[in-house]
């Protein structure tokens, strides 16, 4: 099984400039493959021996494709629900992350031949196994699944036919957690995920009823159809010579359905020698895994801190310019700036990040880190402007009249009289905004920036628990925010005495 470096703290940063390769053999081009390590085993997950590397059957397939194409594989982390948009944008060459062959996806992407066949499974609590054997038994009940999957289509049909209540999730971990806690009555997902959930020992069982079958495929952008065709040749060859079977047997995933699929592809699938189980079932406790994940979390925390500091600096500049324009500018300028502030404050930050990163990709393809920086700065700049405008108008009018009587210009008045006093008023809310920005930076994971919260989510998915990862993440956020709050209080006391 191959292993890859997973630079979690820098996956979405602007690519480093490297010197020209000495030779093609020494520095082959990369095959960038996108996936979501939060999905966990057996797809893409952290190596139990080194949390900075990813393994999984998708990682092995990526290595197989890259080797046959004369390239070196490089993993790029992306949220599962944004994988399609990211490959269309050109963030990586191919998606390999349990991607299902769906009609809507086939319309948008150049998909490979299917390389794995799965069946949808109904999972229920062991205590309810006798009551809920099929979807027909779950009329009026809440049934969870992952959005944008074949399972979601199955539940939509069952909603119309049996009256079940579909509950859609953005990941494949929390549906089973909610089922175990009694928040759901059942979960429908593919057998790979269902078997993993039951294997965790949370009192869940899979029902034998076959709900539907589907296939995993790789996804390329439409303009990469030539590369997709070459990948198809590699996959078909790997089906014939047994390389794909060896990969799936390592993860205890080989089934008669997959064998039949390969037979339909015109392959005579050999029976290779048994391979050791690499399914990731030997899960260690979250506390035992913490030392392995700590370097990853620290690097992700540095990304969070760096992004937050740079974004706050940008927000301060933008906010100061807007505030000055609204206080001193002519009516058309004030109206335009007011419109900007209201639009930005009245729309979600998440939407703004999507527009900047994905919506503007046809015009300019910003690196993920830069798009996140711009989005946070523009958003918080609008909020900062209101703080500064309020602080400027809080300066007594008598002082401004005295400044004009002394012959000071508006710029001199702002610099020597109005600005210093406004800064004292604005310091406390500015500190609050920076702490809020530090936490809101967790949203940038939707555009492939792996910051502290996303790295923690991957840790929690691998460990099967949020307790230890959550406490570690909270401690790191406190370590980042408390010193700033202490500095702000110290400055307030000093200026108050002055």
Image: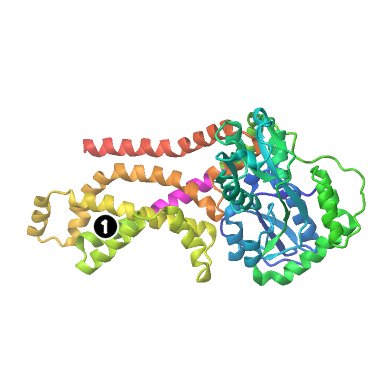
Q: Report the residue that reaches farthest toward the left.
A: 405
- Report the span colored magenta: 299-313
Q: Taking 335 as reference, is 452 left or right?
A: right
Q: Residues within 10 Å of mark 1 (few under 14, many from 20)?
A: many
Question: Where is 331 relative to 260, above or below?
Answer: below
Q: Which residue is the site of mark 1?
A: 323
Q: Position of residue 87 (x, y in %)?
A: 62, 62
Residue positioned 68% across, 70% down in the render: 224
In-front residue for pair 164/311: 164
On screen, residue 242 versus residue 491, left or right, reads right
The percent coordinates of residue 67 (x first, y second) are 80, 60
Q: Position of residue 45 (x, y in %)?
A: 69, 44
Residue at horizontal 59%, vertical 60%? 86
Q: Residue at x 87, y 43 (%)?
A: 275
114 drawn magenta = no
Q: Is residue 85 visible?
A: yes
Residue 216, how many percent across, how many down?
Answer: 72, 55
27 relative to 427 in the view: left or right: right
94 or 67: nearer the eye?
A: 94
Q: Which residue in the rendered view is the most extreme toward the top?
A: 127
SS for tag 1? helix
């Amino acid at each position: 099984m191959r292993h890859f470096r997973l630079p979690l703290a820098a996956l979405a940063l602007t690519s480093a400039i490297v010197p020209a390769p000495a030779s093609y053999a020494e520095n082959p081009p990369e095959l960038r493959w996108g996936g979501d390590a939060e999905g966990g085993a057996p797809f893409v997950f952290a190596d139990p021996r080194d949390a900075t590397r990813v393994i999984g059957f998708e990682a092995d397939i990526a290595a197989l494709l890259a080797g046959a194409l004369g390239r070196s594989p490089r993993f790029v982390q992306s949220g599962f629900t944004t994988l399609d948009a990211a490959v269309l944008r050109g963030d990586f060459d191919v998606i390999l992350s349990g991607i299902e062959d769906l009609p809507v996806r086939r319309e948008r992407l150049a998909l490979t031949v299917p390389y794995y066949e799965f069946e949808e499974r109904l999972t229920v609590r062991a205590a309810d196994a006798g009551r809920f054997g099929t979807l027909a038994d779950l009329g009026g009940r809440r049934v969870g699944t992952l959005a944008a999957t074949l399972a979601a289509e199955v539940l939509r049909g069952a909603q119309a036919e049996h009256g079940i209540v579909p509950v859609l999730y953005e990941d494949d971990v929390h549906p089973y957690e909610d089922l175990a806690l009694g928040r759901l009555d059942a979960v429908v997902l593919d057998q790979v995920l269902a078997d993993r959930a039951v294997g965790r020992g949370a009192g869940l069982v899979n029902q034998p009823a076959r709900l539907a079958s589907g296939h995993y495929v790789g996804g390329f952008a439409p303009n990469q159809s030539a590369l997709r065709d070459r990948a198809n040749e590699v996959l078909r060859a790997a089906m014939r010579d047994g390389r794909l079977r060896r990969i799936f047997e390592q993860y205890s995933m080989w089934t008669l359905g997959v064998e039949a699929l390969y037979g339909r592809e015109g392959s005579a699938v050999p029976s290779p020698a048994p391979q050791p189980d690499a399914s990731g079932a030997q899960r260690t406790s979250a506390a035992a895994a913490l030392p392995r994940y700590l370097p990853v979390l620290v690097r992700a925390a540095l990304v969070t801190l760096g992004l937050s500091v740079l974004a706050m600096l940008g927000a301060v500049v933008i906010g100061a310019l807007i505030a000055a324009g609204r206080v001193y500018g002519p009516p058309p300028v004030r109206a335009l700036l007011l419109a900007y502030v209201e639009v930005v404050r009245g729309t979600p930050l998440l939407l703004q990040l999507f527009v900047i990163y994905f919506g503007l990709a046809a015009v300019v393809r910003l690196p993920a880190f830069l798009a996140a920086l711009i989005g946070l700065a523009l958003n918080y700049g609008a909020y900062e402007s209101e703080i500064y405008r309020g602080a400027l108008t809080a300066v007594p009018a008598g002082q401004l009249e005295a400044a004009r009587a002394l012959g000071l210009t508006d710029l001199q008045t702002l610099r020597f009289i109005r600005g210093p006093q406004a800064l004292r008023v604005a310091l406390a809310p500015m500190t609050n905004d920076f702490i809020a920005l530090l936490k809101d930076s967790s949203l940038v994971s939707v555009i492939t920036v792996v910051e502290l919260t996303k790295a923690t989510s991957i840790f929690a998915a691998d460990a099967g628990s949020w307790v230890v990862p959550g406490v570690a993440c909270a401690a790191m956020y406190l370590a980042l925010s408390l010193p700033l709050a202490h500095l702000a209080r110290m400055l307030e006391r000093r200026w108050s005495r002055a």
